């Protein structure tokens, strides 16, 4: 018989309420029971962990992450994904989309096959779960390439995407693309029909282009403000559309580098916690020292939290998702932990259509749980019912 794990004396951010003094019972991979400590009945079969009043939130979901701890999705190696799934619980990330980047057909194909193989044969509880693939590029606008290598950018092609989706064993869940490119709207319609989330990114789209994209099936923008047509008083662009149109979710890199705190506040006031999704867009240098690293065959220099290409363009981040959460709370007046939970868990789960098992704390859902202290540091992380990370000296 499986031993249950019970977390007691915790402040629990449940799906529809906050329990100031409660317990959570985990059985197998699921949340079996939650409630107030006054209703808790101890038993001899359970492993009890006293959280001494610390906070429990749902596991965080990073829908845009390229790498961490020396590993990158584009390595196309099982060992790299193993590194990622073991490292991410340290920052409270219990699930993520393995994110590719603009590269050759050969390299993208290799990364997709590798990720599908990992999901099928190597995935297990106790590690951050790969939910599928976020295909970032190559169907983007060369004028907004950023860290996407221009030489591999191509026009949207349905047959090529079909080939990649087959190699990925249907694990591509989200595509970042530019709707204004030739063939863009046709691919968007195809993706929508096939249940793939479409996000506008690395795009020079005008407001009218974005509206057409939404009509075709777009529901999101990728890393808001970064590598997209900005706000102008005679042309709202992608940024104006994202801030104005309620249909769109917006990813946001809250490291204080990609977007300044004032613009993050502007986004929060316009989109609020219902429509923002915090992401890291992190690369392999996360958790490592300052130095030079590779990103899709390009040299990246990392110094004091900033990753840049040789031409000075930002090249992803070294941001941890729990730090994004802390920054959001610091930058935005009126933003509280319940709001941040929506942006790190609830909203990404909704976008990926997995709210039945992830994105909140509720009986019957996956036991993806993060224990935080009053400074919002991660003390413990459970990935599908298994303790995956515990900070030294905690409990």
Image (cartoon, rainbow, N blue to C red):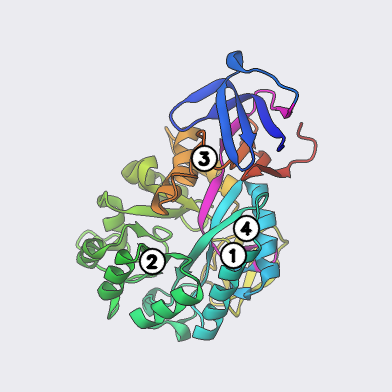
CB within 8 Å, label 1 to label 4: no
x, y percentage for residue 302?
65, 66
Mark whose residue sits in front, 1 or 2: 1
Q: Which residue is mark 4?
A: 305
Q: Determine the main secondary structure of the stretch shown in magenta.
A: strand
Q: Is residue 128 above or below residue 100?
A: above
Of the image marks 2 and 3, the number of the one nearer the N terminus: 2
Q: Given contact means CB atoms under 8 Å apart, are the residues at marks 4 and 2 in contact?
A: no
- Residue receiving disc 2: 201
Helix or strand or loop: what does disc 2 sit on?
loop
Q: Which residue is mark 1?
A: 120
Q: Kindly report which numbered mark, 2 or 3, lies closer to the viewer in this rendering.
A: 3
The tag earlier along the polypeptide, 1 or 2, is: 1
**Residue at figure coordinates x 57%, y 79% from the top left:** 110
Q: Position of residue 132 (x, y in %)?
A: 51, 62
Residue hosting label 3: 365
Q: Nearer the viewer, mark 4 or mark 2?
A: 2
Q: Nearer the viewer, residue 189 or 261?
A: 189
Q: Residues within 10 Å of mark 3 (few under 14, many from 20)?
A: some
User: Do residues under tags 1 and 3 come within 8 Å of each other at their CB atoms?
Assistant: no
Picture coordinates of residue 218 (x, y %)?
30, 62
């Amino acid at each position: 018989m499986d031993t249950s794990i019970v977390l007691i004396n915790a402040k629990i951010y449940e799906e529809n309420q906050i329990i100031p003094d409660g317990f959570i019972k985990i059985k197998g991979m699921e949340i079996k029971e939650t409630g107030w400590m006054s209703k808790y009945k101890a038993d001899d079969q359970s492993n009890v962990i006293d959280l001494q009043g610390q906070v429990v939130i749902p596991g965080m979901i990073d829908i845009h992450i390229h790498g961490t701890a020396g590993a990158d999705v584009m390595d196309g190696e099982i060992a790299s994904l193993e590194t990622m799934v073991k490292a991410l619980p340290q920052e409270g990330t219990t699930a993520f989309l393995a994110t590719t980047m603009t590269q050759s057909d050969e390299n993208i194909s290799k990364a997709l096959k590798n990720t599908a193989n990992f999901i099928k044969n190597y995935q297990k509880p106790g590690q951050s779960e790969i939910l599928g693939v976020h295909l970032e590029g190559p169907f983007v606008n060369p004028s907004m390439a950023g860290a996407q290598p221009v030489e591999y950018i191509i026009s949207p092609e349905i047959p090529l995407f079909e080939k990649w989706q087959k190699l990925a064993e249907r694990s591509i869940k989200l595509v970042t693309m530019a709707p204004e490119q030739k063939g863009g709207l046709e691919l968007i319609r195809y993706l929508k029909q096939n249940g793939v989330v479409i996000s506008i990114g690395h795009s020079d789209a005008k407001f009218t282009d974005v509206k057409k994209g939404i009509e075709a099936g777009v529901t999101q923008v990728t890393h808001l403000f970064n590598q997209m047509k900005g706000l102008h008083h005679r042309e709202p662009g992608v940024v104006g559309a994202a801030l104005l149109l309620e249909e769109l979710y917006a990813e946001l890199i809250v490291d204080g580098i990609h977007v300044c705190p004032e613009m993050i506040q502007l986004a929060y006031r316009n989109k609020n916690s219902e429509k923002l999704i915090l992401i890291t867009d992190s690369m392999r240098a996360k958790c490592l020292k300052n130095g030079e690293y590779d990103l899709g065959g390009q040299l990246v220099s990392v110094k004091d939290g900033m990753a840049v290409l040789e031409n000075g363009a930002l090249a992803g981040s070294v941001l941890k998702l729990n730090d994004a959460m802390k920054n959001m709370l610091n930058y935005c007046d009126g933003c509280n932990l319940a709001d941040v939970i929506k942006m790190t868990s609830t909203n990404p789960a909704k976008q990926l259509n997995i709210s039945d098992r992830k994105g909140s704390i509720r009986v019957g859902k996956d036991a993806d749980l993060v224990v935080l202290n009053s400074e919002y540091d991660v003390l413990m992380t459970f990935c599908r019912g298994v303790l995956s990370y515990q900070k030294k000296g905690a409990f």
